[in-house]
């Protein structure tokens, strides 16, 4: 077979591999994170990939009088604002017992629904701070966990990840099992900037 034939075969082989490679490259960090969670916790159709078990409550948030001086956000304007609140356990396991150590960190998310329609979401969990700084690092942590089974060579991928990200084990060490969701301290995952009316 001549040189052109070999080149053609190589080109066809590359084309056959390209869709899979392109699909992997095209998948977003969020999709890769969910895929890693599914590998860790299994498939649970109709359930969230993480914090699968939770309880939802409805209520009203009434800001303090001082809140309006700190921020011009409508949720602090003075009138009570309807809220939807979800308390949750960590993991993608919908049947996990609330008191299980693996259920940490616990989560609390709040959706504020002011009359002006400017909804605001606050997502918190019971860690004092989040173990990583970016979505990509969180994905990488989960992927390292998936590769760190009992037969994994030492140091395992998750041990290597923790060594390279010293704040991760420090953050995870702050998780404690609460006596109730109501007695748990929750900390923000995201930062908010308060802009006053001035």
Image (cartoon, helix red, strand yellow):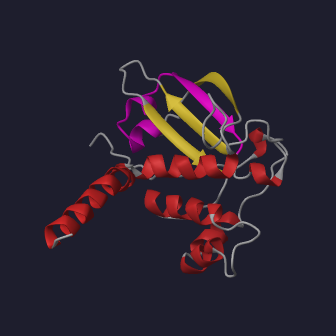
The relative height of residue 110 versus residue 2 in the rendered view (above or below) is: above
Asked whether 178 or 167 is in front, the reply is 167
Identify the residue at the far left of this view: 4
How far from the left and from the top, in percent, is residue 94? 73, 36
The relative height of residue 107 versus residue 170 in the rendered view (above or below) is: above
Q: Quadrant of the N terminus?
A: bottom left
In the figure, is residue 142 to the left or right of 193?
right
Asked whether 26 or 188 is in front, the reply is 26
Residues in magenta, as a range: 67-89
Q: Residue at x 48, y 64 (%)?
A: 137
The relative height of residue 129 versus residue 87 in the rendered view (above or below) is: below
Identify the residue at the far front of this view: 1
In the figure, is residue 56 to the left or right of 68?
right
Q: Is residue 82 magenta?
A: yes
Q: Residue at x 72, y 66 (%)?
A: 149
How far from the left and from the top, in percent, is residue 35? 54, 48
Residue 195 can be seen in this image: yes
In the figure, is residue 59 to the left or right of 7?
right
Q: Residue at x 30, y 39 (%)?
A: 197
Quarter of image, res 3: bottom left
Asked whether 10 or 89 is in front, the reply is 10
Q: Is residue 191 magenta?
A: no
In the figure, is residue 102 to the left or right of 74?
right
Asked whether 54 or 160 is in front, the reply is 160
How many marks are shown on the rendered structure? 0
How far from the left and from the top, in percent, is residue 86? 63, 32
How far from the left and from the top, in percent, is residue 104? 73, 52
Q: Quadrant of the C terminus?
A: top left
The relative height of residue 64 versus residue 178 in the rendered view (above or below) is: above
Residue 130 can be seen in this image: no
């Amino acid at each position: 077979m001549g040189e052109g034939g070999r080149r053609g075969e190589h080109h066809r082989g590359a084309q056959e591999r390209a869709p899979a490679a392109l699909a992997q490259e095209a998948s977003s960090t969020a999709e890769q994170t969910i895929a890693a969670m599914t590998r860790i916790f299994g498939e649970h159709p109709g359930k969230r990939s993480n914090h699968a078990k939770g309880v939802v409550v409805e209520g009203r948030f009434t800001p303090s009088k001082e809140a309006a001086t700190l921020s011009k956000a409508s949720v602090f304007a003075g009138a009570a604002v309807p809220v939807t609140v979800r308390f949750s356990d960590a993991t993608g396991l919908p049947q996990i017992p609330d008191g299980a150590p693996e259920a940490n960190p616990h989560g609390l998310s709040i959706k504020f629904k002011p009359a002006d329609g400017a909804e605001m979401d606050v997502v918190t969990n019971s860690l004092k701070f989040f173990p990583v700084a970016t979505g990509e690092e969180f994905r990488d942590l989960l992927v390292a966990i998936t590769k760190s089974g009992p037969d994994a060579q030492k140091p395992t991928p998750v041990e290597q990840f923790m060594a390279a990200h010293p704040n991760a084990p420090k953050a995870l060490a702050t998780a404690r099992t609460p006596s109730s969701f109501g007695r748990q301290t929750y900390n923000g995952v995201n930062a908010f900037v308060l802009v006053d009316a001035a």
